[in-house]
Image: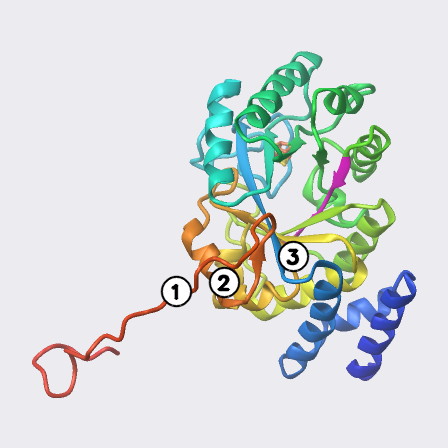
Amino acid sequence: MPALNDVLNRLSDAADAGETPSAADLEAVLASSDAELMDVVAAAARLRFRHFGNKVKLNYLVNLKSGLCPEDCNYCSQRLGSKADVLKYTWLTPEAAAEQAAAGVSGGASRVCLVASGRGPTDMDVERVGKTIAAVKNAAPGVEVCACLGLLKDGQADRLADLGADAYNHNLNTSEDQYAEICSTHTFADRVDTVNSARAAGLSPCSGLIAGMGESHADLVAVALGLREIGSDSIPVNFLLSFDGTPLEGKWELDPRQCLRILAMVRLANPAAEVRLAAGREVHLRHMQGVALQIVNSIFLGDYLTSEGQAAKDDLELIADAGLVPLGLEEAPEAVREQVKVRRRGAGTEVAPNA
Ligand code: SF4
């Protein structure tokens, strides 16, 4: 095993030179020890601050159509046959979606992500989403809109661009080698095709991964390098939310330190990409979320597609405590000042101690 300092120096040199880093070095980051964790975070943080300064982009999800998907992605609570007790509803009207989006924008989001469950949209769905994009932008001029509607057929990416979409999300999720383990109804290549068609249409490609599904370090590195290869502008890093009633029910492979190593590896593999802390951060990173902000430059604000996130207020406090500023704001949100609480429990009182 090479010394970690040498590995991090090589990765930093590759980033400076704009070269693709070696898979072996990226795997060494994932295999590093807890004692080396802050060295790994520091190497990734240097790249984060070099490319993005103290800004954090806030993104807001609106689930336009929830549940009842015919695809069988094992990690997804909306999959075919899912017994997960999640919300199920058909398309929100453009007005209802714009109202949801406006809440996120007023909380500081500069990008709204419009998501619909399903294998992919019909042409009529694309037109419907176009009306929603117009309603969102009308209510919040200047906001970016990313669509996430599944696999795209010929011409649909161009049409979404014509209708005002700025970006298209379609995650690679995991390595090509592991793809058949997590889904049988479409392939890794199908996903790559859709990301490529989005880019060709002039949409900013957003594509990321999910960690914690049984993959190896080599799989994680392969998907991080795959995202570099397809030129993903923004990379959501999700940590598996294991829903009861799905095939990955009960799966729990991550701890907060490994989540930081994964984020750092993705950053070192994609120095200038927007790396986004996505679903699962609250349950898997927990108190290390503030440290993660030293690596990522983007988060989702508020709730996820079928699960609740932490309060938006807590996210803004995390950002302020890290000395960071939401993109679009000039100054950091005001720092929280906790009042001193005089002790009225434990020794010297009749009240149970705090233990
Ligand atoms: S295609 Fe999307 S909504 Fe459908 S099961 Fe897969 S991840 Fe879930």
Which residue lies under the disc numbered 1?
Answer: 336
Residue in the image at 52% along x and 26% along y: 139
- Viewer-nearest of discs 3 and 1: 1
Which residue lies under the disc numbered 3?
Answer: 297
The magenta stretch spans residue 205:
yes
User: What amino acid is labelled 1 in the image?
Assistant: Val
Q: Which residues are magenta?
A: 204-214
Going from N to C along the chain, the mark reached first, 1 or 2, is 2
Kindly indicate whether the residue at mark 2 contacts the one at mark 1 (C-beta within 8 angstroms): yes
Using the numbered discs, state the Cα–Cα distance from disc 3 to disc 1 in whole angstroms. 21 Å
Q: Which mark is residue 70?
A: none
The magenta stretch spans residue 18:
no
Q: Which mark is residue 320?
A: 2
Disc 3 is placed on an element classified as: loop
Using the numbered discs, state the Cα–Cα distance from disc 1 to disc 2 in whole angstroms. 8 Å
State left or right for residue 75 relative to residue 23. Answer: left
Say few, some or many: other residues with alpha carbon within 10 Å of mark 2 (under 14 / 14 to 19 / 20 or more).
some
Q: Is mark 2 within 8 Å of ligand 1?
A: no
Which quadrant of the rendered structure holds the N terminus?
Answer: bottom right
